[in-house]
Image (tube, grey):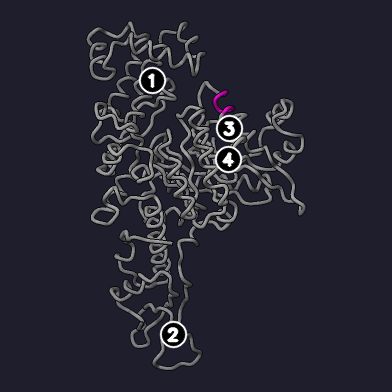
Amino acid sequence: MPPAFDTQGIGRLLSQTRASHHVLRHRAHAAYGLGVDGNIVADNDTNTFPLLGLLPPQYPEWLGDRSFHESHGVRFAYVGGEMARGIASVELVCALAHVGTLGFFGAAGLSLAVLEKNLVRLRDTLDPKELPWGANLIHTVGAPDLEERTVDLYLQYGVRRMSASAFMALSPAVVRYACQGLRRASDGRIERTHHVFAKISRPEVARHFLQPPPIALLEALKAGGKITADEATLAAQLPIAEDITVEADSGGHTDNRPLSALFPTIAALRDAMVAKYSYPRPIRVGAAGGIGTPEAVAAAFALGAAYVLVGSVHQCAVESGLSADGKSMLAEAGIADVAMTAAADMFEAGVKVQVLKRGTLMAARGNKLYQFYRRYESLEAIPDNERAQLERDLFRAPLTDIWRQTEAFFSEHEPEQLVRATRDPKHRMALVFRWYLGLSSRWPLQGDATRRTDYQIWCGPAMGAFNTWVRESFLAPLSNRSVHQMALNLLEGAAAITRAHQLRSLGVPVPASAFVYRPTPLAL
Protein backbone atom coordinates (compact mmCIF):
# COMPACT_ATOMS: atom_id res chain seq x y z
CA MET A 1 0.00 0.00 0.00
CA PRO A 2 1.54 3.36 -1.01
CA PRO A 3 2.26 6.00 1.65
CA ALA A 4 -0.18 8.86 2.20
CA PHE A 5 0.47 12.55 2.73
CA ASP A 6 -3.12 13.79 2.72
CA THR A 7 -5.44 13.52 5.73
CA GLN A 8 -7.91 11.20 4.00
CA GLY A 9 -5.20 8.75 3.01
CA ILE A 10 -3.56 8.97 6.42
CA GLY A 11 -6.91 8.15 8.00
CA ARG A 12 -7.20 4.98 5.91
CA LEU A 13 -3.73 3.82 6.91
CA LEU A 14 -4.39 4.60 10.58
CA SER A 15 -7.23 2.10 10.64
CA GLN A 16 -4.56 -0.61 10.48
CA THR A 17 -3.53 -0.42 14.15
CA ARG A 18 -1.87 -3.82 14.02
CA ALA A 19 0.59 -2.71 11.34
CA SER A 20 3.90 -0.91 11.77
CA HIS A 21 3.53 2.76 10.93
CA HIS A 22 6.37 4.76 9.35
CA VAL A 23 6.45 8.54 9.69
CA LEU A 24 7.78 9.86 6.37
CA ARG A 25 8.71 13.18 4.76
CA HIS A 26 7.84 13.92 1.16
CA ARG A 27 10.93 14.84 -0.86
CA ALA A 28 9.17 17.42 -3.04
CA HIS A 29 7.26 19.53 -0.52
CA ALA A 30 8.59 18.33 2.86
CA ALA A 31 5.12 17.34 4.08
CA TYR A 32 4.83 14.71 6.80
CA GLY A 33 3.04 11.51 5.85
CA LEU A 34 2.46 7.92 6.81
CA GLY A 35 3.45 4.56 5.45
CA VAL A 36 2.41 1.07 6.45
CA ASP A 37 4.96 -1.75 6.57
CA GLY A 38 7.32 -1.35 3.59
CA ASN A 39 11.10 -1.65 3.66
CA ILE A 40 13.75 0.50 5.27
CA VAL A 41 16.72 1.07 2.96
CA ALA A 42 20.00 2.88 3.46
CA ASP A 43 20.33 4.53 0.04
CA ASN A 44 19.08 7.95 -1.05
CA ASP A 45 16.93 6.75 -3.93
CA THR A 46 14.52 9.38 -5.17
CA ASN A 47 11.79 6.73 -5.20
CA THR A 48 11.98 6.43 -1.42
CA PHE A 49 10.91 8.76 1.38
CA PRO A 50 13.08 9.88 4.30
CA LEU A 51 12.09 7.96 7.45
CA LEU A 52 11.46 10.21 10.47
CA GLY A 53 9.98 7.70 12.89
CA LEU A 54 8.73 4.16 13.30
CA LEU A 55 5.92 2.90 15.50
CA PRO A 56 5.41 -0.83 16.04
CA PRO A 57 1.90 -2.37 15.90
CA GLN A 58 -0.48 -1.12 18.57
CA TYR A 59 -2.40 -3.83 20.41
CA PRO A 60 -5.02 -3.35 23.15
CA GLU A 61 -2.99 -5.80 25.24
CA TRP A 62 -0.22 -3.20 25.47
CA LEU A 63 -2.38 -0.58 27.14
CA GLY A 64 -1.74 -0.12 30.84
CA ASP A 65 1.00 -1.37 33.14
CA ARG A 66 2.63 -4.71 32.30
CA SER A 67 2.98 -5.49 35.99
CA PHE A 68 -0.81 -5.45 36.27
CA HIS A 69 -1.06 -8.13 33.59
CA GLU A 70 1.62 -10.21 35.27
CA SER A 71 0.37 -9.84 38.85
CA HIS A 72 -3.22 -10.75 38.06
CA GLY A 73 -2.88 -13.08 35.09
CA VAL A 74 -4.94 -11.01 32.67
CA ARG A 75 -4.56 -10.30 28.98
CA PHE A 76 -5.95 -6.77 29.18
CA ALA A 77 -5.58 -4.05 31.84
CA TYR A 78 -9.36 -3.88 32.17
CA VAL A 79 -11.45 -4.42 35.29
CA GLY A 80 -15.19 -4.89 35.69
CA GLY A 81 -16.43 -3.02 38.74
CA GLU A 82 -18.39 -4.54 41.59
CA MET A 83 -21.93 -3.21 41.11
CA ALA A 84 -23.77 -4.06 44.32
CA ARG A 85 -26.48 -6.62 45.03
CA GLY A 86 -25.07 -9.03 42.48
CA ILE A 87 -25.58 -6.70 39.52
CA ALA A 88 -21.96 -7.58 38.83
CA SER A 89 -23.13 -11.17 38.66
CA VAL A 90 -21.38 -14.52 38.52
CA GLU A 91 -22.16 -14.63 34.80
CA LEU A 92 -20.65 -11.19 34.23
CA VAL A 93 -17.48 -11.95 36.23
CA CYS A 94 -17.02 -15.27 34.40
CA ALA A 95 -17.51 -13.67 31.00
CA LEU A 96 -14.87 -11.05 31.81
CA ALA A 97 -12.45 -13.71 33.01
CA HIS A 98 -12.86 -15.76 29.85
CA VAL A 99 -12.04 -12.76 27.66
CA GLY A 100 -8.82 -12.03 29.56
CA THR A 101 -9.95 -9.30 31.95
CA LEU A 102 -10.68 -9.13 35.68
CA GLY A 103 -14.15 -8.86 37.18
CA PHE A 104 -15.27 -8.24 40.77
CA PHE A 105 -18.48 -9.82 42.02
CA GLY A 106 -20.92 -7.30 43.52
CA ALA A 107 -21.27 -8.64 47.06
CA ALA A 108 -22.55 -5.49 48.77
CA GLY A 109 -26.16 -5.72 49.90
CA LEU A 110 -26.36 -9.52 49.69
CA SER A 111 -26.90 -11.81 52.63
CA LEU A 112 -23.95 -13.92 53.69
CA ALA A 113 -25.80 -17.07 52.62
CA VAL A 114 -26.39 -15.73 49.10
CA LEU A 115 -22.82 -14.46 48.92
CA GLU A 116 -21.48 -17.87 49.91
CA LYS A 117 -23.43 -19.64 47.16
CA ASN A 118 -22.07 -17.23 44.56
CA LEU A 119 -18.49 -17.60 45.81
CA VAL A 120 -18.80 -21.37 45.41
CA ARG A 121 -20.02 -20.93 41.82
CA LEU A 122 -17.16 -18.57 40.98
CA ARG A 123 -14.55 -20.78 42.58
CA ASP A 124 -15.82 -23.95 40.91
CA THR A 125 -16.10 -22.28 37.50
CA LEU A 126 -12.93 -20.20 37.30
CA ASP A 127 -10.33 -21.69 39.66
CA PRO A 128 -9.91 -24.96 37.73
CA LYS A 129 -9.10 -22.87 34.65
CA GLU A 130 -6.75 -20.61 36.65
CA LEU A 131 -8.74 -17.55 35.60
CA PRO A 132 -8.65 -14.49 37.88
CA TRP A 133 -11.65 -13.03 39.68
CA GLY A 134 -12.48 -11.10 42.82
CA ALA A 135 -15.27 -9.83 45.06
CA ASN A 136 -15.82 -6.61 46.94
CA LEU A 137 -15.97 -5.56 50.55
CA ILE A 138 -17.98 -2.42 51.15
CA HIS A 139 -17.58 -0.55 54.40
CA THR A 140 -20.60 -1.25 56.60
CA VAL A 141 -21.13 1.67 58.92
CA GLY A 142 -21.98 0.50 62.42
CA ALA A 143 -21.66 -3.19 61.52
CA PRO A 144 -17.99 -4.20 61.64
CA ASP A 145 -18.99 -7.78 62.33
CA LEU A 146 -20.49 -8.00 58.83
CA GLU A 147 -17.14 -7.01 57.34
CA GLU A 148 -15.39 -9.65 59.45
CA ARG A 149 -17.81 -12.39 58.44
CA THR A 150 -17.53 -11.41 54.78
CA VAL A 151 -13.74 -11.66 54.97
CA ASP A 152 -14.13 -15.02 56.69
CA LEU A 153 -15.97 -16.25 53.60
CA TYR A 154 -13.34 -14.78 51.26
CA LEU A 155 -10.57 -16.55 53.10
CA GLN A 156 -12.55 -19.78 53.28
CA TYR A 157 -13.29 -19.88 49.55
CA GLY A 158 -9.94 -18.65 48.30
CA VAL A 159 -10.91 -15.21 47.02
CA ARG A 160 -7.52 -13.86 45.95
CA ARG A 161 -8.62 -10.32 45.06
CA MET A 162 -10.85 -8.00 47.07
CA SER A 163 -11.99 -4.52 46.12
CA ALA A 164 -12.43 -2.39 49.24
CA SER A 165 -14.88 0.45 48.68
CA ALA A 166 -16.53 3.29 50.65
CA PHE A 167 -13.89 3.09 53.42
CA MET A 168 -12.79 6.27 55.16
CA ALA A 169 -10.13 4.47 57.22
CA LEU A 170 -8.70 0.97 57.58
CA SER A 171 -10.76 -1.66 59.32
CA PRO A 172 -9.34 -4.79 60.98
CA ALA A 173 -11.13 -6.92 58.38
CA VAL A 174 -9.30 -5.25 55.48
CA VAL A 175 -5.93 -5.54 57.18
CA ARG A 176 -6.51 -9.18 58.13
CA TYR A 177 -7.37 -10.06 54.55
CA ALA A 178 -4.29 -8.27 53.19
CA CYS A 179 -1.92 -9.86 55.70
CA GLN A 180 -3.00 -13.48 55.75
CA GLY A 181 -0.78 -15.57 53.51
CA LEU A 182 2.14 -13.15 53.30
CA ARG A 183 5.38 -15.08 52.92
CA ARG A 184 8.98 -14.59 51.88
CA ALA A 185 10.05 -16.43 48.73
CA SER A 186 13.37 -18.23 48.34
CA ASP A 187 14.81 -15.21 46.50
CA GLY A 188 13.87 -12.88 49.37
CA ARG A 189 10.83 -11.27 47.77
CA ILE A 190 7.66 -10.87 49.82
CA GLU A 191 4.78 -12.64 48.11
CA ARG A 192 1.09 -11.94 48.61
CA THR A 193 -1.70 -14.47 48.67
CA HIS A 194 -4.40 -11.79 48.76
CA HIS A 195 -4.56 -8.57 46.74
CA VAL A 196 -6.54 -5.55 47.96
CA PHE A 197 -7.84 -3.13 45.35
CA ALA A 198 -8.55 0.11 47.22
CA LYS A 199 -11.28 2.17 45.55
CA ILE A 200 -10.80 5.77 46.68
CA SER A 201 -11.73 9.31 45.69
CA ARG A 202 -9.84 11.32 48.33
CA PRO A 203 -6.12 11.62 49.08
CA GLU A 204 -6.62 11.26 52.83
CA VAL A 205 -8.31 7.90 52.28
CA ALA A 206 -5.75 6.76 49.72
CA ARG A 207 -2.99 7.45 52.23
CA HIS A 208 -4.32 4.72 54.55
CA PHE A 209 -3.99 2.11 51.82
CA LEU A 210 -0.63 3.38 50.56
CA GLN A 211 1.03 2.94 53.95
CA PRO A 212 1.88 -0.19 55.91
CA PRO A 213 -0.80 -1.15 58.45
CA PRO A 214 -0.59 0.60 61.83
CA ILE A 215 1.61 -1.35 64.21
CA ALA A 216 -1.08 -1.29 66.91
CA LEU A 217 -3.56 -2.91 64.54
CA LEU A 218 -1.05 -5.58 63.50
CA GLU A 219 -0.32 -6.34 67.15
CA ALA A 220 -4.02 -6.64 67.94
CA LEU A 221 -4.58 -9.03 65.04
CA LYS A 222 -1.55 -11.06 66.09
CA ALA A 223 -2.68 -11.19 69.70
CA GLY A 224 -6.11 -12.36 68.59
CA GLY A 225 -4.65 -15.15 66.49
CA LYS A 226 -5.90 -13.60 63.26
CA ILE A 227 -2.43 -13.35 61.69
CA THR A 228 0.92 -14.92 62.53
CA ALA A 229 4.00 -13.15 63.84
CA ASP A 230 5.74 -13.66 60.48
CA GLU A 231 2.77 -12.18 58.61
CA ALA A 232 2.77 -9.15 60.91
CA THR A 233 6.50 -8.62 60.34
CA LEU A 234 6.15 -8.82 56.57
CA ALA A 235 3.01 -6.64 56.53
CA ALA A 236 4.95 -3.82 58.17
CA GLN A 237 7.11 -3.63 55.02
CA LEU A 238 4.28 -3.37 52.47
CA PRO A 239 1.35 -1.11 51.70
CA ILE A 240 -2.13 -2.48 52.33
CA ALA A 241 -2.92 -2.24 48.61
CA GLU A 242 -0.71 -2.38 45.54
CA ASP A 243 -3.66 -1.50 43.30
CA ILE A 244 -5.32 1.85 43.97
CA THR A 245 -8.48 2.54 41.95
CA VAL A 246 -9.07 6.28 41.57
CA GLU A 247 -12.84 6.70 41.41
CA ALA A 248 -13.90 9.90 39.69
CA ASP A 249 -17.46 10.87 38.65
CA SER A 250 -19.04 7.44 38.93
CA GLY A 251 -22.41 5.88 39.58
CA GLY A 252 -23.30 5.14 43.19
CA HIS A 253 -20.97 6.48 45.88
CA THR A 254 -18.95 9.31 44.35
CA ASP A 255 -17.43 12.68 45.14
CA ASN A 256 -18.08 13.76 41.52
CA ARG A 257 -14.42 14.71 41.04
CA PRO A 258 -13.10 14.91 37.46
CA LEU A 259 -10.56 12.21 36.66
CA SER A 260 -8.16 14.73 35.10
CA ALA A 261 -7.82 16.49 38.47
CA LEU A 262 -8.07 13.55 40.84
CA PHE A 263 -5.80 11.05 39.12
CA PRO A 264 -2.60 13.17 39.08
CA THR A 265 -3.19 14.06 42.75
CA ILE A 266 -3.36 10.41 43.80
CA ALA A 267 -0.47 9.44 41.51
CA ALA A 268 1.71 12.10 43.14
CA LEU A 269 0.74 10.83 46.60
CA ARG A 270 1.61 7.29 45.48
CA ASP A 271 5.04 8.46 44.35
CA ALA A 272 5.63 10.16 47.69
CA MET A 273 4.62 7.06 49.67
CA VAL A 274 6.78 4.75 47.55
CA ALA A 275 9.77 7.04 48.13
CA LYS A 276 9.06 7.36 51.85
CA TYR A 277 8.77 3.64 52.53
CA SER A 278 11.16 2.33 49.85
CA TYR A 279 8.71 -0.35 48.77
CA PRO A 280 10.31 -3.23 46.86
CA ARG A 281 7.85 -3.01 43.96
CA PRO A 282 5.62 -0.32 42.41
CA ILE A 283 2.10 0.54 43.45
CA ARG A 284 -0.30 0.67 40.52
CA VAL A 285 -2.92 3.40 40.17
CA GLY A 286 -5.99 2.61 38.06
CA ALA A 287 -8.77 4.84 36.79
CA ALA A 288 -12.54 4.53 37.27
CA GLY A 289 -15.56 6.77 36.97
CA GLY A 290 -16.81 8.36 33.77
CA ILE A 291 -15.32 5.61 31.59
CA GLY A 292 -17.81 4.50 28.97
CA THR A 293 -16.21 5.26 25.60
CA PRO A 294 -12.93 4.41 23.85
CA GLU A 295 -11.93 8.07 24.14
CA ALA A 296 -12.35 7.91 27.91
CA VAL A 297 -10.37 4.66 28.13
CA ALA A 298 -7.55 6.13 26.02
CA ALA A 299 -7.56 9.31 28.11
CA ALA A 300 -7.25 7.30 31.33
CA PHE A 301 -4.25 5.40 30.00
CA ALA A 302 -2.75 8.66 28.75
CA LEU A 303 -2.97 10.00 32.32
CA GLY A 304 -0.83 7.05 33.38
CA ALA A 305 -3.48 4.62 34.58
CA ALA A 306 -2.14 1.11 35.13
CA TYR A 307 -5.64 -0.22 34.42
CA VAL A 308 -9.15 1.03 33.83
CA LEU A 309 -12.25 -0.02 35.74
CA VAL A 310 -15.63 0.09 34.01
CA GLY A 311 -18.60 -0.07 36.33
CA SER A 312 -22.10 1.31 35.78
CA VAL A 313 -21.91 0.88 31.99
CA HIS A 314 -21.73 -2.89 32.54
CA GLN A 315 -25.17 -2.79 34.16
CA CYS A 316 -26.77 -2.87 30.72
CA ALA A 317 -24.75 -5.94 29.69
CA VAL A 318 -26.58 -9.17 28.91
CA GLU A 319 -24.85 -10.84 31.89
CA SER A 320 -25.74 -8.11 34.39
CA GLY A 321 -28.00 -8.94 37.32
CA LEU A 322 -30.20 -5.91 36.59
CA SER A 323 -33.69 -6.64 35.28
CA ALA A 324 -34.58 -6.19 31.61
CA ASP A 325 -36.75 -3.22 32.61
CA GLY A 326 -33.86 -1.54 34.41
CA LYS A 327 -31.53 -2.14 31.47
CA SER A 328 -34.02 -0.59 29.06
CA MET A 329 -34.11 2.54 31.21
CA LEU A 330 -30.32 2.75 31.22
CA ALA A 331 -30.25 2.37 27.43
CA GLU A 332 -32.25 5.60 27.11
CA ALA A 333 -30.01 7.66 29.40
CA GLY A 334 -28.09 10.71 28.26
CA ILE A 335 -25.08 12.22 29.99
CA ALA A 336 -27.26 14.66 31.98
CA ASP A 337 -29.86 12.09 33.04
CA VAL A 338 -28.31 11.51 36.47
CA ALA A 339 -28.77 13.06 39.90
CA MET A 340 -27.48 12.79 43.45
CA THR A 341 -29.72 11.38 46.17
CA ALA A 342 -29.56 10.15 49.76
CA ALA A 343 -27.59 6.95 50.35
CA ALA A 344 -29.25 4.17 52.29
CA ASP A 345 -26.08 2.94 53.99
CA MET A 346 -24.87 6.36 55.19
CA PHE A 347 -28.17 8.21 55.35
CA GLU A 348 -27.72 9.98 58.68
CA ALA A 349 -24.28 11.25 57.68
CA GLY A 350 -25.78 12.98 54.66
CA VAL A 351 -23.83 10.88 52.15
CA LYS A 352 -25.27 10.82 48.64
CA VAL A 353 -25.09 8.46 45.67
CA GLN A 354 -25.40 9.18 41.95
CA VAL A 355 -28.37 7.54 40.28
CA LEU A 356 -30.40 7.52 37.09
CA LYS A 357 -32.85 10.43 36.91
CA ARG A 358 -34.59 9.75 33.61
CA GLY A 359 -37.84 7.82 33.99
CA THR A 360 -37.80 7.67 37.79
CA LEU A 361 -38.67 9.96 40.69
CA MET A 362 -36.42 8.17 43.15
CA ALA A 363 -33.69 10.84 43.30
CA ALA A 364 -36.10 13.61 44.22
CA ARG A 365 -37.95 11.41 46.70
CA GLY A 366 -34.73 10.27 48.39
CA ASN A 367 -33.62 13.87 48.82
CA LYS A 368 -37.02 14.74 50.24
CA LEU A 369 -36.63 12.07 52.89
CA TYR A 370 -33.28 13.51 53.91
CA GLN A 371 -34.80 16.99 54.10
CA PHE A 372 -37.48 15.61 56.42
CA TYR A 373 -34.80 13.92 58.52
CA ARG A 374 -33.00 17.25 58.94
CA ARG A 375 -36.21 19.17 59.63
CA TYR A 376 -38.01 16.89 62.10
CA GLU A 377 -36.98 15.07 65.28
CA SER A 378 -39.26 12.06 64.90
CA LEU A 379 -41.90 10.47 62.69
CA GLU A 380 -44.56 11.85 65.00
CA ALA A 381 -43.30 15.40 64.42
CA ILE A 382 -43.98 15.26 60.69
CA PRO A 383 -47.14 17.30 59.91
CA ASP A 384 -50.20 15.23 59.06
CA ASN A 385 -50.43 16.45 55.46
CA GLU A 386 -46.75 15.69 54.82
CA ARG A 387 -47.04 12.30 56.49
CA ALA A 388 -50.09 11.43 54.40
CA GLN A 389 -48.20 12.31 51.22
CA LEU A 390 -45.26 10.10 52.22
CA GLU A 391 -47.56 7.19 52.99
CA ARG A 392 -49.42 7.62 49.69
CA ASP A 393 -46.58 8.29 47.24
CA LEU A 394 -43.41 6.75 48.68
CA PHE A 395 -44.25 4.06 51.18
CA ARG A 396 -47.71 3.11 49.90
CA ALA A 397 -48.56 2.00 53.42
CA PRO A 398 -48.98 3.57 56.87
CA LEU A 399 -45.65 4.43 58.49
CA THR A 400 -46.60 2.23 61.43
CA ASP A 401 -46.67 -0.76 59.08
CA ILE A 402 -43.35 0.27 57.56
CA TRP A 403 -41.82 0.46 61.03
CA ARG A 404 -42.95 -3.09 61.80
CA GLN A 405 -41.24 -4.33 58.62
CA THR A 406 -38.14 -2.30 59.43
CA GLU A 407 -38.07 -3.63 62.97
CA ALA A 408 -38.29 -7.21 61.73
CA PHE A 409 -35.41 -6.67 59.30
CA PHE A 410 -33.04 -5.09 61.79
CA SER A 411 -33.89 -7.56 64.55
CA GLU A 412 -32.41 -10.23 62.28
CA HIS A 413 -29.51 -8.33 60.71
CA GLU A 414 -28.45 -5.46 63.01
CA PRO A 415 -30.33 -5.65 66.35
CA GLU A 416 -28.11 -2.95 67.84
CA GLN A 417 -29.85 -0.48 65.55
CA LEU A 418 -33.15 -1.20 67.30
CA VAL A 419 -31.59 -0.64 70.71
CA ARG A 420 -30.52 2.81 69.56
CA ALA A 421 -33.92 3.48 67.96
CA THR A 422 -35.72 2.91 71.27
CA ARG A 423 -33.61 5.67 72.79
CA ASP A 424 -33.53 8.01 69.82
CA PRO A 425 -36.75 8.69 67.86
CA LYS A 426 -34.78 10.52 65.18
CA HIS A 427 -32.75 7.37 64.52
CA ARG A 428 -36.02 5.41 64.38
CA MET A 429 -37.20 7.83 61.70
CA ALA A 430 -33.93 7.33 59.79
CA LEU A 431 -34.41 3.56 59.82
CA VAL A 432 -37.90 3.93 58.39
CA PHE A 433 -36.63 6.23 55.65
CA ARG A 434 -33.87 3.72 54.90
CA TRP A 435 -36.61 1.16 54.23
CA TYR A 436 -37.51 3.10 51.09
CA LEU A 437 -33.92 3.84 50.10
CA GLY A 438 -32.89 0.22 50.54
CA LEU A 439 -35.81 -1.35 48.69
CA SER A 440 -35.63 1.20 45.86
CA SER A 441 -32.35 -0.41 44.79
CA ARG A 442 -33.93 -3.88 44.85
CA TRP A 443 -36.98 -3.08 42.76
CA PRO A 444 -34.98 -2.57 39.51
CA LEU A 445 -33.26 -5.90 40.08
CA GLN A 446 -36.63 -7.60 40.44
CA GLY A 447 -38.13 -5.63 37.55
CA ASP A 448 -41.09 -4.63 39.74
CA ALA A 449 -43.07 -2.54 37.23
CA THR A 450 -45.40 -1.28 39.96
CA ARG A 451 -42.38 0.49 41.47
CA ARG A 452 -40.77 1.73 38.24
CA THR A 453 -41.00 5.38 39.30
CA ASP A 454 -39.05 4.45 42.44
CA TYR A 455 -36.20 2.56 40.77
CA GLN A 456 -32.82 3.45 42.25
CA ILE A 457 -30.30 2.58 39.53
CA TRP A 458 -26.74 3.65 40.28
CA CYS A 459 -25.53 5.51 37.24
CA GLY A 460 -23.02 8.18 36.20
CA PRO A 461 -22.59 10.28 33.04
CA ALA A 462 -20.56 7.47 31.44
CA MET A 463 -23.80 5.60 30.70
CA GLY A 464 -25.10 8.41 28.52
CA ALA A 465 -21.74 8.71 26.77
CA PHE A 466 -21.77 4.98 26.06
CA ASN A 467 -25.29 5.17 24.62
CA THR A 468 -24.27 8.02 22.32
CA TRP A 469 -21.21 6.08 21.16
CA VAL A 470 -23.08 2.86 20.29
CA ARG A 471 -26.08 4.54 18.68
CA GLU A 472 -26.84 3.03 15.26
CA SER A 473 -24.17 0.36 15.81
CA PHE A 474 -24.48 -3.36 16.51
CA LEU A 475 -24.21 -2.57 20.26
CA ALA A 476 -27.31 -0.38 20.22
CA PRO A 477 -29.74 -3.28 20.88
CA LEU A 478 -29.54 -4.49 24.46
CA SER A 479 -29.53 -8.09 23.24
CA ASN A 480 -26.11 -7.50 21.64
CA ARG A 481 -24.50 -5.90 24.67
CA SER A 482 -22.55 -8.89 25.92
CA VAL A 483 -19.93 -7.73 28.37
CA HIS A 484 -17.10 -9.26 26.32
CA GLN A 485 -18.14 -7.28 23.22
CA MET A 486 -18.41 -4.12 25.31
CA ALA A 487 -14.96 -4.64 26.81
CA LEU A 488 -13.23 -5.63 23.57
CA ASN A 489 -14.68 -2.67 21.68
CA LEU A 490 -13.71 -0.19 24.38
CA LEU A 491 -10.17 -1.55 24.37
CA GLU A 492 -9.84 -1.82 20.59
CA GLY A 493 -11.11 1.72 20.22
CA ALA A 494 -8.73 2.98 22.88
CA ALA A 495 -5.81 1.36 21.06
CA ALA A 496 -6.81 3.02 17.78
CA ILE A 497 -7.18 6.43 19.42
CA THR A 498 -3.87 5.99 21.25
CA ARG A 499 -2.15 5.33 17.93
CA ALA A 500 -3.72 8.48 16.46
CA HIS A 501 -2.38 10.51 19.40
CA GLN A 502 1.07 9.02 19.01
CA LEU A 503 1.29 9.95 15.33
CA ARG A 504 -0.10 13.43 15.85
CA SER A 505 2.57 14.07 18.48
CA LEU A 506 5.15 13.18 15.80
CA GLY A 507 3.83 15.84 13.48
CA VAL A 508 1.64 13.69 11.21
CA PRO A 509 -1.51 15.56 10.07
CA VAL A 510 -3.94 13.11 11.64
CA PRO A 511 -7.60 13.67 10.63
CA ALA A 512 -10.29 14.13 13.27
CA SER A 513 -11.94 10.93 12.06
CA ALA A 514 -8.97 8.94 13.41
CA PHE A 515 -10.09 9.78 16.94
CA VAL A 516 -13.49 8.16 16.39
CA TYR A 517 -13.93 4.39 16.69
CA ARG A 518 -17.20 2.75 15.77
CA PRO A 519 -18.21 -0.50 17.49
CA THR A 520 -17.78 -3.65 15.47
CA PRO A 521 -18.21 -7.36 16.38
CA LEU A 522 -14.86 -8.63 17.66
CA ALA A 523 -13.39 -11.98 18.62
CA LEU A 524 -10.15 -12.96 20.31
Residue neighbourhood size for the residue with mark 1, other residues' Cα within 10 Å, grouped as few (<14), some (14–19), many (≥20): many
Looking at the picture, which amino acid does disc 1 mark? Arg
First of labels 2, 3 by sequence position: 2
Q: Over which residues does the magenta segment extend?
A: 145-149
- Magenta-span inclusion, residue 473: no
* Residue on which the image places disc 4: 159
Dot 3 and dot 1 residues touching (CB under 8 Å): no
Residue at left offset 27%, top offset 20% = 394
Depth-wise, is mark 3 or mark 1 nearer the camera?
A: 3
* Quarter occupied by residue 346: top left
Would you place residue 12 above or below residue 381 in this image?
below
Q: Distance between the Cα atoms at labels 2 and 4?
A: 55 Å
Number of marks drawn:
4
Depth-wise, is mark 2 or mark 3 nearer the camera?
A: 3
Main secondary structure along the magenta-highlighted residues: helix
Q: Distance between the Cα atoms at labels 2 and 1?
A: 69 Å
Q: Distance between the Cα atoms at labels 4 and 3?
A: 8 Å
Residue 50 — which label? Answer: 2
Q: In the image, 97: left or right of 15?
A: right
- Measuring from the top left, give residue 475's x and y in whole percent: 30, 53
* Residue on which the image places disc 1: 434
* Residue on which the image places disc 3: 153
Looking at the picture, which amino acid does disc 2 mark? Pro
- Measuring from the top left, give residue 168's x and y in whole percent: 53, 31
First of labels 3, 1 by sequence position: 3
* Secondary-structure class at tag 1: helix
Q: Distance between the Cα atoms at labels 2 and 3?
A: 63 Å
Dot 4 and dot 3 residues touching (CB under 8 Å): yes
Residue nearest the viewer, comparing 418 with 126: 126
Would you place residue 386 above or below residue 25 in this image?
above
